[in-house]
Image (cartoon, grey):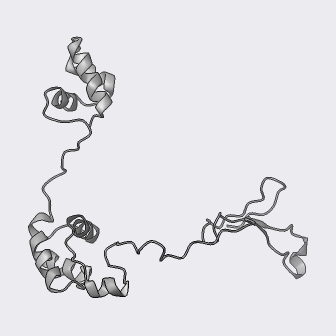
């Protein structure tokens, strides 16, 4: 796929008399790709579909099943559609359900404030915000007994209390053991 700028450059070079091969070498693209854009068969910024839509022929079946039972679990529907011949994976299936807007809304669930399935986000303000730590550097106490000679370990946590990869960090001040 050529960007809009590459397409403009390719057409300008072609008007100057450059060959398709020279333009392709200059842009670092395949000759057939450049030729497709120069002939007008392809448009910049638009990808060609990878193949036929595997979900298309099952969309109406899903629409009917979900209209009958809006609370039907996507895994159950996926198993039914797979038995009918759908060859895609579960994530592709749920993506197609979301993109097609096939799951109808339920007034009872909306009134109760329940979150819909299939990746729907909860309403704004319903998620608890993450706490922000005032002091991200935590000094761990020294171990008791025979381990007293070891230096203290400092752990640098993330900005939020639930973040962090669990790696120890001494801030570059002195050589300290690192927690793994």
Residue at point 91% right, 71% down?
A: 149
Q: Nearer the viewer, residue 11 or 149?
A: 11
Quarter of image, res 119: bottom left
Quadrant position of the N terminus in the picture: top left
Give the total of numbered labels: 0
- Relative side of 140 to 16, left or right: right
Q: Position of residue 90 (x, y in %)?
A: 26, 71
Instruction: Return the residue nearer the eye: 156 or 124.
Output: 124
Question: Where residue 179 sits: x, y (%)?
Answer: 71, 67
Extreme-front residue of the structure: 111
Front in this rendered view, residue 108 or 142 = 108
State the residue at coordinates (89%, 79%). 146
Q: Vertically, is 38 above or below 71?
A: above
- The residue drawn where x is 33% and y is 85% is 111
Left or right, residue 134 beside residue 25: right
52 up-or-down from 63: above or below: above
Q: In the depicted view, which residue is nearer to us: 31 or 92?
A: 92
Locate residue 37, reporting x and y percent.
19, 30
Instruction: Name the quarter where the C terminus is drawn.
Output: bottom right
Dividing the picture into quadrants, the one containing residue 140 is: bottom right
Image spot of residue 136 (x, y percent):
72, 65
Classify residue 169 by image quadrant: bottom right
């Amino acid at each position: 796929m050529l960007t809009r700028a590459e397409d403009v450059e390719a057409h300008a070079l072609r008007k100057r008399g450059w060959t398709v091969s020279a333009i392709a070498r200059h842009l670092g693209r395949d000759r057939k790709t450049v030729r497709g854009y120069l002939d007008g068969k392809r448009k910049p910024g638009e990808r060609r579909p990878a193949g036929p839509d595997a979900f298309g022929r099952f969309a109406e079946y899903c629409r009917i099943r979900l209209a009958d039972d809006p609370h039907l679990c996507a895994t159950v529907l996926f198993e039914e559609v797979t038995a009918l011949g759908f060859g895609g994976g579960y994530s592709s299936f749920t993506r197609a359900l979301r993109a097609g807007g096939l799951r109808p809304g339920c007034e009872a669930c909306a009134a109760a404030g329940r979150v819909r399935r299939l990746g729907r986000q909860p309403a704004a303000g319903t998620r608890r915000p993450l706490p922000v730590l005032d002091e991200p550097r935590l000094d761990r106490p020294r171990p008791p007994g025979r381990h007293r000679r070891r230096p203290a370990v400092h752990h640098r946590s993330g900005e939020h209390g639930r973040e962090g990869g669990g790696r120890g960090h001494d801030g570059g001040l002195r050589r300290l053991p690192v927690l793994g």
